[in-house]
Amino acid sequence: MLEARPIVVNPDGVIIGGNMRYKACKTAGLTEAPVYFATWGEAKEREFTIKDNTSAGEHDFDVLANEWDATELNEWGLNVWDPQEEDKEKTEKPEEECEICGKKWKR
């Protein structure tokens, strides 16, 4: 499995893909594992980080909501909130109905 999906690190040696594989290697007592050194730049690293974790990774949705673009996250396969739907909800006023006559109005 490690040959098929190596641990991916950036030029600073920071793991950007394969944190759990790295942890499993340490737990298993391995002293060596395949590593891919990515020199993509920050934008590609961010995209890779999301794509690498969409199927089985865990995400901190508070961090995603505050530091990431929802449109990009959705394009990369991580289904999160729809920013257009959120804007729509803010502008739409709920419709209410009079309990006596049944007429509807918006607040």
Image: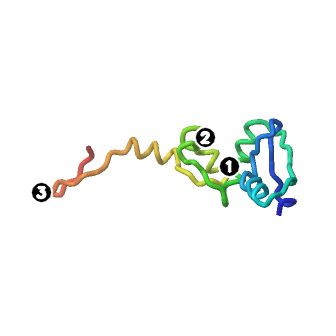
Mark 3, secondary structure of its residue: loop
Estimate how packed mark 1 is, as few (under 14), some (14 to 19) or many (20 or more) residues with alpha carbons within 10 Å: many
Front residue (pair 71, 80):
80
Name the disc covering residue 50, or none.
1
Q: Amino acid at mark 2?
A: Trp
Residue located at (78% from left, 61% from top) = 28
Name the side, left or right, on which 53 lies relative to 63: right
Q: CA distance from mark 1 to mark 3?
A: 52 Å
Callout 1: SS = helix
Q: On the image, numbered disc 2 is attached to which residue?
A: 68
Q: Nearer the viewer, mark 1 or mark 3?
A: 1
Q: Are marks 1 and 2 in contact (CB under 8 Å)?
A: yes
Q: CA distance from mark 2 to mark 3?
A: 47 Å
Of label 2 and label 3, which has the lower sequence position? 2
Of callouts 1 and 2, the N-terminal one: 1
Q: Residue at x 87, y 53 (%)?
A: 32
Give the camera-side residue of 36 and 68. Answer: 36
Residue reaching furthest to the bottom: 1
Which numbered disc, 1 or 3, marks the residue that appears first in the sequence?
1
Residue that label 3 marks = 100
Q: Position of residue 73 (x, y in %)?
A: 63, 47
Badge 3, how many Cα within 10 Å: few under 14, some, many 20+?
A: few
Name the side, left or right, on which 74 lies relative to 39. left
